[in-house]
Image: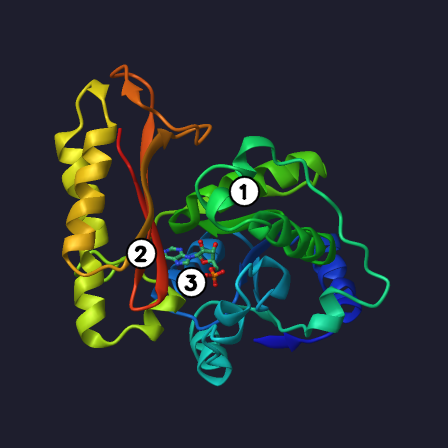
Amino acid sequence: MILFKKSDELKKYLIKKTAEGISIGFVPTMGALHEGHLFLVRTAKEKSGLVITSIFVNPTQFNDQQDYLHYPKTIDQDILLLEKSACDVLFLPDVQEIYPSGYVANHYALGSLETVLEGKYRPGHFQGVCQVVDRLLAIVMPSTLFLGQKDYQQCMVIERLIDLKQYATKLYVVPTMRENSGLAMSSRNLRLNEQDREKAAAIHAGLTHLKSRLQPGKVQPLCDDVAMSLLQAGFEKVDYISIANAQTLEPVEEWDGNTALVALAAVFLSGVRLIDNIPLT
Ligand code: AMP
């Protein structure tokens, strides 16, 4: 695996590979890698000639400074894991490399994606995500970008970004990798103790239960039941348990029995904010 810290050197290398006819698969991450990330890398390797992973904890997407400061960092282990996996190139920029002096932040027209669900509870988050992914796509110019379905709304936001900026990059969404308990793998799980990790499995269990009870008609009571059961189980806060249109993420109050739906959750356990989702139909 080749490590690049400078974007101009990386760019030169990748332009050469592309000219040789090699397709570039790109997996952007914030590090603290787990099996979910490595699943993205393996999928990217299956579908591309060369796989590049980036590790960059992007300051502009954190609306909570404490969350940024406490974001787990395990860079030595990350490098070992990537070396053992199929990753060909690691891009490890510093903040100055991504946001050089004189960088002017764009504003991205994300429409309602920015005001629902994560957009509502994390103001400015998706603008920050677009800033970093825009910079990374301009540097890497991948044939295919690999993102995890775990961050369902983020996938839709990036799809919009690709469209807005007319990038010649395809988006490939990889299913969520879970622990045996059903808990979605996440770097943030590192901040949970063992007992909390067991408890956190209730998120996926709640969404699965909701799916099993879904019927045409009003759906809000199903969400309220799951929220209530999580609070009773010891979660300190529920930002949302929501059923939304799987294509637009608009909230659905009454299901017609046909529209494709997704159930999404954002909850706090021991001060750690966890998100998850499952397609319902
Ligand atoms: P992050 O490091 O959290 O920014 O995540 C980097 C990429 O890995 C994003 O595209 C995430 O959606 C994806 N990812 C995170 N957790 C999982 C998981 N459990 N399964 C599949 N992909 C994931």
Kind of residue indicated by mark 3? His
Seen from the viewer's position, the closer of residues 266 and 175 is: 266
Seen from the viewer's position, the closer of residues 172 and 2 is: 172
Quarter placement of the C terminus:
top left
User: Element under label 2?
Assistant: loop
| Some atom of ligand 1 lies within 8 Å of the CB belonging to the residue at label 2 | yes
Q: Are marks 1 and 2 in contact (CB under 8 Å)?
A: no
Q: Which residue is mark 3?
A: 37
- Residue 261 versus residue 123 in the image, above or below: above
Q: Earlier in the sequence, mark 1 or mark 2?
A: 1
Q: Residues within 10 Å of mark 2 (few under 14, many from 20)?
A: many
Answer whether residue 19 is visible to the viewer in this image: yes
Q: Which residue is mark 2?
A: 177
| Some atom of ligand 1 lies within 8 Å of the CB belonging to the residue at label 3 | yes
Seen from the viewer's position, the closer of residues 20 and 135 is: 135
Report the residue at 75% width, 70% height from top: 97
Marker disc for residue 26: none
Q: Residues within 10 Å of mark 3 (few under 14, many from 20)?
A: many
User: Element under label 3?
Assistant: helix
Q: Residue 205: where, in percent of width, then height?
A: 16, 49
- Residue 98 versus residue 168 in the image, above or below: below
Tell which residue pokes out farthest to the bottom in this image.
76
Q: Which residue is mark 1?
A: 171
